[in-house]
Image (cartoon, rainbow, N blue to C red):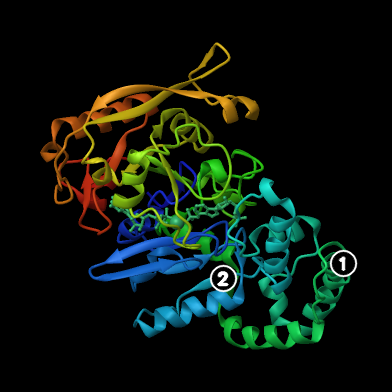
Amino acid sequence: MPATVLVGTQWGDEGKGKITDLLADQMDIVVRFQGGNNAGHTVVDGATELKLHLIPSGILYPHITPIIGSGCVVDPQVLLREIDGLTERGIRTAKLMVSANAHLIMPYHRVLDGARERKLGNSKIGTTRKGVGPAYTDKAARIGLRMQDMLDMKIFRQKLDAALAEKNELLTKIYDLPPFSADDICEEFTGYADRLSTYIADVPYVLNQALDRGDNVLFEGAQGTLLDLDFGTYPFVTSSSPTAGGACVGTGVGPSRIEKVLGIAKAYITRVGSGPFPTELNDEIGHMLQDTGKEVGTTTGRIRRCGWLDTLILKYAVQVNSLTHLAITKLDVLSSLETIQICVGYEHEGTFYDRLPAHQSVFHKCVPVYEELPGWGEPITEVTEFDKLPGAAQSYIKRIEEIAGVPVELIAVGPRRDQTIWRNKQGGPQAARTLQ
Ligand code: GDP
Ligand code: IMO
Ligand code: MG
């Protein structure tokens, strides 16, 4: 299974970090293909909890080559902070590679992200304010600066001058904010360039060579399907392509090389930031999910909105990502519930929908239709085999599988690596690979 793509099937925070770390055991390379430090991926190794924003979640394994692909946007200040934080913990980052073509998040992108959100007022997206959207905007407008520009500060300066000519007008005249000085930015980035130049690599070449050799490559998605710029709940989305196709666009590996697409779904759903959320719970069950699931944003510290699992979203994710497998995380968080609701349709003005409505006004106003399943009412955090799960928990997984039409390969019942149930008898990533 040389090339596996891992994606979020909801609005992010599905537990991608945990599953990536788990699968990395059997991989040679883990590559991020989109997003920036808006991501917050949690990896728990024994007593150590790591929150990674930019560096791939396979970093804990010395055998892994972690790669940041060209579809990502990189804030060099954040990258260096992450490298230093990992080094302090004794985790080596020497093998890290960053695509020469990855775009840079510049200081003015961070400021513009906040300024645009303030201007939008009640219509704000609720971005992470890390400058991600403005950096992708400049990439598409062809006035962005890239990692490789730091290898030649003369070119960097020329491109910066061109970008600032426009940005400073925008900052001063539209947002009433102070302009940026090109000299200051150049000085700051010369320091970053000195430290980061050794990581800059020809990523498409490295990845394709690795795949030719038969190496195992895991493409680690950030965010989730409904935050996708094209397929998500626009405009309440991020500015990149977190769906499986993004893995190709964001790394320089063609689709024929992808053999497996694993979708990560929480046993319920969460969302940070604004936007529609049909199954959102604003009652005591919603609060229970927030508390028990520790649903606080990894990147921004915002409380995550919580709701019942929505299988219309899941089916949509299966479709737009061509998922071959599913991983269900945080099943343990539902353990105290007497009954569990699972959304199987929407109703809007007398019409029943069994798939996501294409028109966003319907999605904003629809009423979820639920199927009720029994809860299991006992802790499952130490269960390691599917057959040992309470019957009701097994039924919940089987129902999800039935509706999604894709096998649930693994189930997470806690944040640790060992709190994982593999659906095959042998257990573990190696055995899972024989399923292919
Ligand atoms: P990501 O962005 O998709 O990587 O997810 P986050 O790391 O932002 O959020 C997932 C949170 O749930 C993290 O704190 C994980 O440690 C935790 N987590 C992952 N899987 C499980 C699980 O099965 N049960 C519980 N209780 N927590 C989990
Ligand atoms: P991981 O990888 C959850 C959300 C923001 C906001 C919208 C746009 O940890 O799953 P942006 O800063 O990207 O312009 O914000 O997207 N968002 C996430 N929500 N998990 C994430 O990443 C997210 N990254 C961005 O809250 O609604
Ligand atoms: Mg997260």
Does label 1 point to a residue whose CB lies under 8 Å from ligand 2? Answer: no
Does label 2 point to a residue whose CB lies under 8 Å from ligand 2? Answer: no
Using the image as rendered, state which of residue 167 and residue 150 is in the foreground: 167
Side of 422 relative to 136 (left or right):
left
Q: Quadrant of ligand 3?
A: bottom left
Please name the residue that numbered disc 2 is placed on: 98
Q: Position of residue 107 (x, y in %)?
A: 70, 74
Cα separation, mark 2 vs mark 1, equals 28 Å
Q: Which residue lies furthest to the top in this view?
A: 350
Using the image as rendered, state which of residue 164 and residue 154 is in the foreground: 164
Residue at 64 percent across and 70 percent down: it is 100
* Three-letter code, disc 2: Val
Q: In this view, does 102 lie above or below 228?
A: below
Side of 103 relative to 98 (left or right):
right
Label of residue 166 in the image: 1
Q: How crowded is mark 1: few (under 14 residues within 10 Å), some or many (20 or more)?
A: few
Q: How crowded is mark 2: few (under 14 residues within 10 Å), some or many (20 or more)?
A: many
Side of 405 relative to 362 (left or right):
left
Could you say which quadrant of the image residue 177 lies in?
bottom right
* Three-letter code, disc 1: Glu
